[in-house]
Image (cartoon, rainbow, N blue to C red):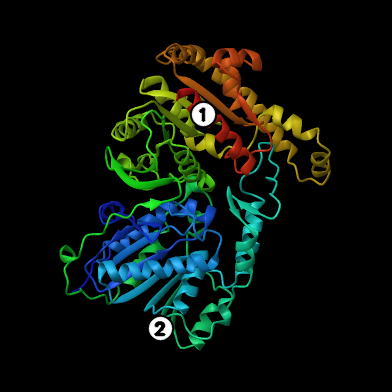
Amino acid sequence: MAFETVPVGSDAAASPLPLSPVAFDGLFGWFGPGISRRGVVLCATHGYEQLSAHRPWRALAEGIATTGCATLSFDYPGTGDSADAEADSVEGRVRAIRRAIRHLRDEAGVEEIVLVGLRLGGTLAALAAEGDHVDRLVLLAPFATGRAYLREMKMQSRTIGRLPDGSPLPQEEGCLTVGGFHLGPALAAELSVIDLTKAERAPAPDILLVGAEAGGLGPRYAALGARVTTRPFPGLAALVANPLYAETPDEAFSAVIASVAEGAQPRPVPAAALPPLPANPIRGDGWWEEPSRFGPSLFGILCHPRDVEAARPMVLFVNAGTNVHSGWGRQTTTLARRLADQGFPSLRMDLRGIGDSPNRPGGASPLYSLDALDDVRAALDRLETVRSGPIVIVGACSGAYLAFRAVCREERLKGAVLVNPYCFDWNPADDVDSVIRNVFRNASTYAGLLKQGAAWRRLARGEIRVGAIARAITRAAIGRVGKRLALLLRPRPAGGSVAQRIAALRRRGAHLELVYSAGDRGLAALHEALGRSPARMARRLGGPVTIIEGADHDLSPAAAQARMTEVLERLLARLR
């Protein structure tokens, strides 16, 4: 029996139907039983790179599932939606891969195993294969050594998650932070001793290396007796460099799908005869979680307290940008479990077009689109089936914009925490992509930067492009004038000005908390709506605006996350 390879970009490959959420041994994943003797385990990369690659990686898993191969994609311990045991351990991740192999053998009845690993996931897959029988290994731009991986992460840490003034985010002592993900000293020490080129046997008889030659791995594995095939990896940078603009590398992924499905044979036991998967939620000391589908095939994770108290408020987390529901630096998963430990249930959801929810019609972006309010309503309906009680919505960046519009329209929402909203009303004349890609800051930020001695030294060395800054300031000034004229000419939003809508929220008893990183670009919209005086803003909001020093737009530092958590916990306590 031959299996058809479905292109990654096709509608069939984009459908969420072939895969279902599953939990096993404290790990969360997506599983398709398939109809062949062959099973494929996808081993993701780590941290910020995987945050960027999440949706294309899911498309790869779905494409593999459509070939008939049993397919399992999962989160390592301490990542995504998995439990936290063995979170800072290379061995813990290697054991997780082996548990995934065992799960495929037990639940899908497969006889052959293929491991597909991306970047660090390729390195881990090779390590796992050295101690387990694997028939085929597909390594996508793997690191031959852990030191090579650490060197690259150190370089990324200097460019990802910068402060509003453009300076690098300070690193916490003993910890490497890349895009909000913290790599601690214990894990770094384990990574530093990995060297795949010292393998004493081939990890699999058939190996596909995708990408630039990684430290001599190909010749080494060939010398150990493996049949090694190599091919280029066009589109790698666009896959792992930025969650907002991640692109599926169709050519490379189609080649991977063809490779893993080649020669696969049907198994004698049809899929319908396989035993159903047992219910096995992810659990912690004070919480337990279950995957949930609701509305138009939307996906989210319900986090329940171990001890139920009906009067406690519930929390709805919406996506920040295009980050999957676990959040930047996995902040949302961590926060949801902390709240559940205190008795507060929550739902962290993916809007259509983000994470594990289906595409929006036409593949449109959900950012700053008001039809995303329909997704929020579906999530509120789902929360109301959990228990009755007040609901608080939490969003950052574009999610904060959506949360503000939702709390204004939905009386079921009794409060909102808005983190670094760029605006409260989106101007349809603005291009979302252009606004997001704009790297220049406002004039006051540049003025503050140039007062610093380090900035003067950079200026003297020619590292600061004065002409570009001047042009940016001029464009910003012209843009502000144009926006003010546009505001005067266009109709007022329903409900009146931002200040009027906030006043209406307060009259109905809803609470609004605003949290900003010091110097964030969104402060301009706040001052335009509520004034510059902290006292005046506090009178209009019913409380002060929280300004966090030393934080980037995404609140990567642990101290910044803790401050935002305090604000949310204060609001929940007020609603109890």
Q: Position of residue 20 (x, y in %)?
A: 29, 54
Name which residue type carries label 1.
Leu
Vertical position of residue 487 compared to residue 207: above or below: above
Q: At 51% across and 29% down in the image, what residue appears?
A: 418
Residue behind mark 2 = 205
Vertical position of residue 181 compared to residue 296: above or below: below
- The answer to whether residue 248 is left or right of residue 436 is left
Give the mark nearest the N terminus, 2 or 1: 2
Vertical position of residue 404 compared to residue 13: above or below: above
Vertical position of residue 512 compared to residue 272: above or below: above
Q: At 51% across and 70% down in the image, what residue appears?
A: 123
Q: CA distance from mark 2 to mark 1?
A: 53 Å
Residue behind mark 1 = 418
Q: Nearer the viewer, residue 283 or 481?
A: 283
Q: Nearer the viewer, residue 232 or 110?
A: 110
Q: Position of residue 348 (x, y in %)?
A: 41, 40
